[in-house]
Amino acid sequence: MGAYIELPNVEMYGEVFDIPEPDELLFISWFEGGEVFRSGCVWHRGRGKIFYFRPGHETFPIFYNKDVLKVLANGVRWAKFAGNTEARGVIECPNVKEPLEKLSPKDYKMGEIEHPKA
């Protein structure tokens, strides 16, 4: 794969794209009219990884492009769960913002579910 992916026909996207600041920006799309768009972003949240990629829309056969397929495959490989054996609850995730309203106690511990007997 080269330094860039050139797609002849794509649906144009433009900023403002209301997402959190990415931990790393991998791709910027540039369109003929001068518009740019953050098209490849990654985030780390707790022990998880998030990969966002915007190659285009299904209107054009973009998902058959060999470079787009390579980026998607590499993104999945990068984001896959890799040996973190100790599960963490959502309430323990350091990147979760405090809620506007407290709905439940933070010390909730999941236990066994008691099912009614038939």
Image (cartoon, rainbow, N blue to C red):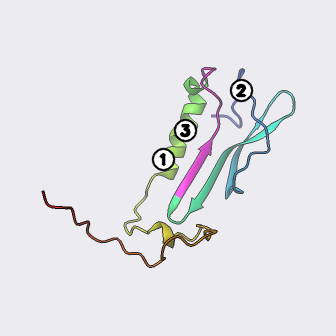
Q: Residue at x 79, y 45 (%)?
A: 16
Q: Amino acid at mark 3?
A: Leu
Circle nearer the viewer, 2 or 1: 2
Residue 11 bears which disc, if any?
A: 2
Looking at the image, the residue that sits furthest to the left is 118
Does dot 3 land on a helix, a strand or a loop?
helix
* Residue under label 3: 72
Q: Earlier in the sequence, mark 3 or mark 2?
A: 2
Three-letter amino acid code at disc 2?
Glu
Local crowd size for mark 3, using a 10 Å CA cut-off: few (<14), some (14–19), many (≥20): some
The amino acid sitting under disc 1 is Arg
Query: Which SS class for mark 2?
Result: loop
CB atoms of marks 2 and 1 within 8 Å = no
Q: Sequence-wise, which precedes: disc 3 or disc 1?
A: 3
Question: Tag 1, which secondary structure?
Answer: helix
- Position of residue 8 relative to residue 84, above or below, is above
Residue under the point 14% across and 61% down: 117
Q: Which residue is mark 1?
A: 77
Residue 19's disc number: none
Q: Is residue 90 left or right of residue 15?
A: left
Question: What percent of the width, then of the height, locates residue 42?
Answer: 62, 52
In the image: residue 5, left or right of residue 90: right
Magenta stretch contains residue 21? no
Which segment did they paint magenta?
A: 49-61
Q: Earlier in the sequence, mark 2 or mark 1?
A: 2
Residue under the image location 62 percent in, 68 percent down? 97
Report, in whole angstroms, how far the alpha carbon at label 2 lies from the one at label 1.
27 Å
Q: Nearer the viewer, mark 3 or mark 2?
A: 2
Q: Residue 99 at what x, y percent from top left?
A: 61, 68
